[in-house]
Structure formats: C-alpha cells, structure tokens
Image (spheres, rainbow, N blue to C red):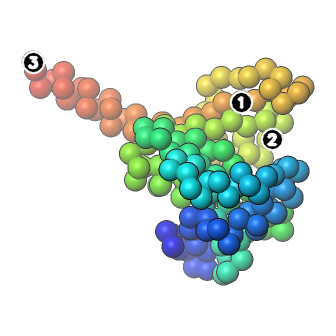
Amino acid sequence: MEKTNINLSIEKMTENQTVQVFEIERELLGTSNIDVIKQTLNSETLTYYVLKKDDEIIGFLEISIISPECELYDIAIKKEFQGNHYSDVLMNFLIEKSKAEKVETIFLEVNSINNKAISLYKKFGFYAYTIRKNYYGKNDAILMKKDLWFWVFVFYEIFEIWKFK
C-alpha cells in the first residue's frame, strides 16, 4: 500500500482488481477494454492506481510517468461516492507521486464540456495551455498542465548567474 488516510488507501492496481477498474471505467465513460487495462500490469510507464475505502475499490487513477513528465489519462470515482472529495485524494496522490518521481510537469486533456473535471484540475493548479478544436466531435479538448518544479529552476538559474559574477 502506498498511502493511507483513515480508511482510505491508494495502491498500484493488481491483476485481480482489473475487473473492478473495468466496471468503473465502463460505468462512467461508457467504454472500456479489459485487455488494455490488463496490459498496463506489464507496462513500465503506464500505471493504474486504485483508491480503496475499506476493502472496496471506489475509484482509480491512470497515469504515465516518463520523467520529467507525467500524463494523467483518467481519474474516476464511482457514482455513489462522488461529491465526497475522493477525487481530491487521488489528485494529491498524483502530485506527490509525480514529485517523488522528479516530474517537472503533469499534463492532461479534458473535454471542454466536463466542467466538474475542469474545476477539479484548476483547484489543483492546472491551467489550459492549448485547445484541440472539435476533438470530441463538436466539443473541444482542453490541454492542461501543472508545473511542479518551476520555482526550483528559476532559483537555480538566478543562483548560477549570481555565482559567476
């Protein structure tokens, strides 16, 4: 187990959890592929993390970390658990995991009509940097990012310049 908070825990998805993740993904997104989910078990970069309340999987996070970048592909909370800030738990985990992996920037893409997700991402410091017009049929895709180490690089550059004066 990677992180625990009262009766919540986040752990890397195991093979016997793939069906539950598949069911959540299918319920919320309307589509899913269990074989693709299972393939991530052997991936060096693409990983699912499950959020458990007691012993029940109530959500998941799908990310790819290829340092210095991380991409958030999916974040999902079962419908009956939505509205209880469980997505905040996953977002905090994403940011802390990324920092531990020396990630500089986290990227994501979101449907422009998904106001709930956009609000969540903004709450955690993500900002839009470009738009893909009509990516989702009539809807645009908003590409967002969060810079984790910006100020470290700024101070490093200032120090390097000052050091040689």
Q: How far apart are marks 3 and 1 (CA)?
A: 43 Å
Q: Say which quadrant the C terminus sits in.
A: top left
Label 2 secondary element: loop
**Residue denoted by label 2:** 114
As shown in the figure, which amino acid type bears the numbered disc 2? Asn
Q: Which of marks 3 and 1 is in front?
A: 1
151 horizontally vs 44: left or right: left
Q: Which amino acid does label 1 sit on?
A: Ile
Disc 1: which residue: 142
Q: In this view, does 63 lie to the left or right of 24?
A: left
Mark 3 / mark 1, whichever is N-terminal: 1
User: Eyeballing the image, is 165 above or below 103?
Assistant: above
State if disc 1 and disc 2 touch (CB < 8 Å). no
SS class of the residue under badge 1? strand
Q: How would you rate the neighbour count of disc 2 (Cα within 10 Å): few for under 14, some for 14-19, many for 20 or more?
A: few
- Front: mark 2 or 3: 2
Kindly identify the residue that appears in the image at 58 percent across and 37 percent down.
107
Q: 22 or 79: which is nearer to us?
A: 22
Horizontally, residue 161 falls left or right of residue 129, namely left
> Between marks 2 and 1, how big is the CA–CA gap?
10 Å
Of the image marks 2 and 3, the number of the one nearer the N terminus = 2
Which comes before the other along the chain, label 2 or label 1? 2
Q: Can residue 125 be seen in this view?
A: no
Q: Where is residue 116 in the image (x, y as percent from the top left)?
A: 78, 47
Task: Give the total number of marks visible in the rendering.
Answer: 3
Q: Is residue 64 above or below residue 144?
A: below
Q: Where is residue 70 in the image (x, y as percent from the top left)?
A: 52, 42
Q: Give the percent coordinates (x, y) of residue 115.
A: 79, 41
Residue 145 seen: yes
Residue assigned mark 3:
165
Inter-mark Cα distance, 2 to 3: 50 Å
- Image spot of residue 30 (x, y percent): 88, 50
